Amino acid sequence: TEFTMSKITLFIAFICLFVIVQAQSDRDICRRIVARCESRVVRNGRNNDISNIFNENCRRTQRNWREISRCELAKANCILTLERCNTLSCENVRRALAQ
């Protein structure tokens, strides 16, 4: 039983380490996506059709919605997809950008 417990503990430690390493690489991916987007704001503009439609939809459902840029939407999308496995809703985007 002691040997089995140590194997289980080792397995749990390995899983925790894997999750920490994976979370770090996901954050790096999101950071690179946002940096690339922000470096192209002059050429591509602050907003696009997608961010405009998203903002318009969120303003309809949430009175005090703060308009977000396409780069902020890209950041929220990355965080929600890679780090949190969540949907791209107005409330989830607001929470993702608040961190």
Image: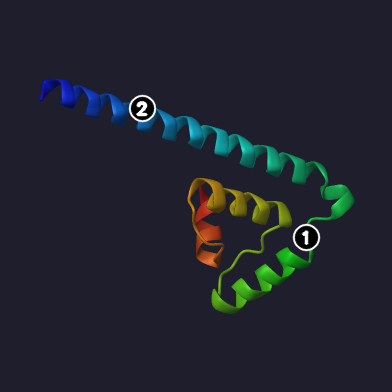
Question: In the image, residue 34 lies at what x, y percent?
Answer: 69, 44
- Tally the numbered discs: 2
Name the mark on residue 14. 2
Q: Secondary structure at mark 1?
A: loop
Q: Residue at x 50, y 64 (%)?
A: 91
- Say which label, 2 or 1, has the lower sequence index: 2
Q: Quadrant of the N terminus?
A: top left
Q: Residue at x 59, y 53 (%)?
A: 76
Q: Amino acid at mark 1?
A: Asn
In-front residue for pair 39/84: 84
Estimate the spatial distance between the alpha carbons at disc 2 and disc 1, rounded to whole Å.
42 Å
Q: Secondary structure at mark 2?
A: helix
Question: In the image, residue 93 lies at what x, y percent?
Answer: 55, 59
Residue projecting furthest to the bottom: 60
Judge from the rendering whether residue 53 lies leftward or rightward of residue 80; answer left or right: right
User: Where, by quadrant of the figure, is residue 5 drawn?
Assistant: top left
Question: In the image, residue 13 lies at what x, y percent?
Answer: 32, 27
User: Where, by quadrant of the figure, is residue 55 drawn?
Assistant: bottom right
Judge from the rendering whether residue 6 lies leftward or rightward of residue 26; answer left or right: left
| Badge 2 vs badge 1, beta-carbon distance below 8 Å | no
Q: Residue at x 29, y 31 (%)?
A: 12
Name the mark on residue 66. none
Q: Is residue 80 above or below residue 17?
A: below
Q: Which residue is mark 1?
A: 47
User: Closer to the observer: label 2 or label 1?
Assistant: 2
Judge from the rendering whether residue 58 lies leftward or rightward of residue 83; answer left or right: right
Q: Residue at x 61, y 54 (%)?
A: 77
